[in-house]
Image: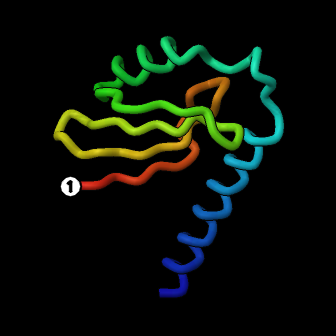
Amino acid sequence: MLRMITLIAALALAAGLNAARAQQAAPADRWMEIGALAEKLQAEGYRLIEVERDDGVYEVVMADSQGYRIEAHLDPVTGERLAQRRFDD
């Protein structure tokens, strides 16, 4: 049980550090274009529903190949996932 709590805490800390790194640095001219981001996600098998720039990250709502809705925060320069949640509604 203690190992599980430690693992969850470590993952949460890593996600927070990644999000903080993305929020502090990237000037707008270095951000990936929304069209390029959409192409990247579509190539990974996602259907894009909504994209927003907010708090230094891209906030994305998309659906995977099984129809699950996913909300994610993406690094604005690389498109790397910083955090995500999957919903089955």
Residue 76 appears left or right of 23: left
Number of labels in the image equals 1
- Image spot of residue 25 (x, y percent): 82, 34
Residue at 41%, 14% (x, y): give it. Answer: 39
Label 1: few (<14), some (14–19) or many (≥20) C-alpha neighbours in 10 Å: few
Figure quadrant of the C terminus: bottom left
Depicted 82 relative to depicted 78: above or below: below
Residue 3 appears left or right of 26: left
Depicted 86 relative to depicted 24: above or below: below
| Tag 1: amino acid | Asp
- Image spot of residue 10 (x, y percent): 63, 66
Depicted 27 relative to depicted 13: above or below: above
Depicted 79 relative to depicted 87: above or below: above
Residue 68 appears left or right of 3: left
Q: Secondary structure at mark 1?
A: loop
Residue at 35%, 36% (x, y): give it. Answer: 62
Q: Quadrant of residue 70?
A: top left
User: Can you identify the residue that label 1 sits on?
Assistant: 89
Residue 12 appears left or right of 4: right
